[in-house]
Amino acid sequence: MPTADVRVTVDSVVLTVQEDTLEVLLIKRKYEPFKTKWALPGGFLETSDKSLEDAVARELYEETNVSNVYLEQLYTFGDKGRDPRGRVVTVAYLALIRQEGFELRTSSEASGVAWWPVNALPELAFDHERIISYAHQRLKYKIEYSPAAFKLLPDKFTLRDLQMIYEGVLGKAIDNRNFRKKFLNTGVLQELEETTQESSFRPARLYSFSEEDFEKLPDRPVFVFS
Amino acid sequence: MPTADVRVTVDSVVLTVQEDTLEVLLIKRKYEPFKTKWALPGGFLETSDKSLEDAVARELYEETNVSNVYLEQLYTFGDKGRDPRGRVVTVAYLALIRQEGFELRTSSEASGVAWWPVNALPELAFDHERIISYAHQRLKYKIEYSPAAFKLLPDKFTLRDLQMIYEGVLGKAIDNRNFRKKFLNTGVLQELEETTQESSFRPARLYSFSEEDFEKLPDRPVFVFS
DNA sequence: ATAGGTAGCGTAGACTTGACGCTTACTTGA
DNA sequence: TCAAGTAAGCGTCAAGTCTACGCTACCTAT
């Protein structure tokens, strides 16, 4: 049996939450196949890449200017026929960031970079819609069993900000009072002296999260809300 | 930048529990590289494989005679230098089976097939030790949050059998009385009329698990034991 | 008959969960 | 100046779950 003549690509699904909307970072393709369609940032594994992680970080930087983010392996897609150019195996990665920290820049290889709401995507190239849906699933899970939410928030945030992340990702409303109570009980939040002043309502206390303190907890808290 | 000249392999980590020992299915390599070392069943993606799942099932069958098992994607390994033959990206899969159901057969491509205790492995080819360790981690997790344990058991089993699976996988003792109580409360066990007679002690009631009934439960039970 | 060991039942206290009533503190507009 | 509006934040209660652990039941071998 002939060994398949195959190429490997790495794609990144970069997610963020804006207000209470989950968004994904996409680029507009400049070349065929799928010219003018939107797609996940990514590309072929190159000889110089020491690892898949290196490769996906490189591609993300080249195509969107986003760098220095934690990329976690999501899933590998290798069905025949998913790329018209031939057999392509794609290793997809997931990153969670907050938009404010990054300045998007379109590369010469693309004709656009933008955030798109996951619930209102344009027409996508390849099987990227499926990959994004898989990433969304994974995030729903991660946010309940890991401190993933804090990657989507600035260093200082209010309980309301945090709750909006959960509501945006899970797509459901959560009881405000139980959310507050349960989260404060987990012991992962550091209460700060400061409060917000932005809104026209009562100012809210700011909190911070420390990865270090989290690791020191005797038991991993669970962030599940009914 | 040159696109990497890369080949893709698929490997399967097939796990089972014998008594209270977690074991993995390995083959002894007949050819270089790593001739005479033990390795995970697997091989190169071939042109005729419609999907990665097809490929890994085919390789597993060819090399060990094990077929018709559910293979779940585990992780993809692609670091430079992990295969002396060149750049190789390996998609690893995980399967859980009970030994009795399968008759191992050495293929002409290998010089042996055998079950090895995960805690007492021989010297392994490539980075397969790392892959197995990753699989063990995943199983520890899966067994607490999914009905994975039942894949490791025959259709009819006692509560003791079930507990031994948990103790073997998690590597710790569990309180017999709480285990029984909690598991019976999950509602996933079907009590049978029959009892065992094998041991020289009091016969134990047999139970069965039905995937269908499990799916019908309003909430997914959790199988975590302190 | 008894010893040894698994099978199996039950309880009490501590903790967690989910629903929800209510007060507090701020801004805005009449 | 003060009432209205809204988010921020506190507290309670009843139901359920978890854990540690005492105890009984049943079987075989000697």
Image (cartoon, coloured by chain):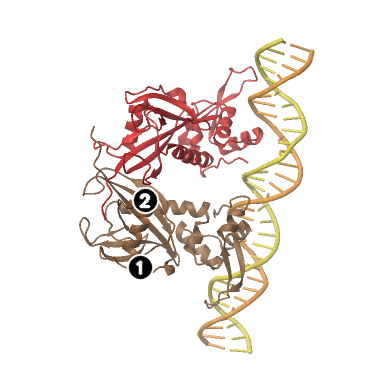
Chain colours: A brown, B red, C orange, D yellow
What is the secondary structure assignment of the residue under circle 2?
loop
Q: Quadrant of residue B71?
A: top left
> Which mark is first along the chain, 1 or 2?
2
Q: Is residue A32 above or below residue B131?
A: below
* Residue sitting at x 61%, y 36%: B172
The quarter of the picture where the C terminus of chain B appears is top right
* Disc 2 packing (10 Å; few <14; some 14–19; many ≥20): some
Residue B20 shows in this picture: yes
Q: Which mark is residue A50?
A: 2
* Residue sitting at x 54%, y 41%: B144
The quarter of the picture where the N terminus of chain B appears is bottom left
**x, y percentage for residue A72?**
43, 52
Give me the chain letter of mark 1.
A
Instruction: Give me the C-alpha separation between circle 2 and circle 1.
Output: 26 Å
Residue with the mark numbered 1? A104
Q: Nearer the viewer, mark 2 or mark 1?
A: 2
Verify CB contact (< 8 Å) between mark 2 and mark 1.
Answer: no
Kind of residue at badge 2: Lys
Q: Which mark is residue A42?
A: none
**x, y percentage for residue A152?**
47, 62
Kind of residue at badge 1: Leu
**x, y percentage for residue A90?**
32, 48
Give me the chain letter of mark 2.
A
Q: Nearer the viewer, residue A150 or C26?
A: A150
Q: Is residue A31 above or below residue B24?
A: below
Q: Quadrant of residue A190?
A: bottom right
**x, y percentage for residue A62?**
32, 62
Residue A132 shows in this picture: no
* Disc 1 packing (10 Å; few <14; some 14–19; many ≥20): some
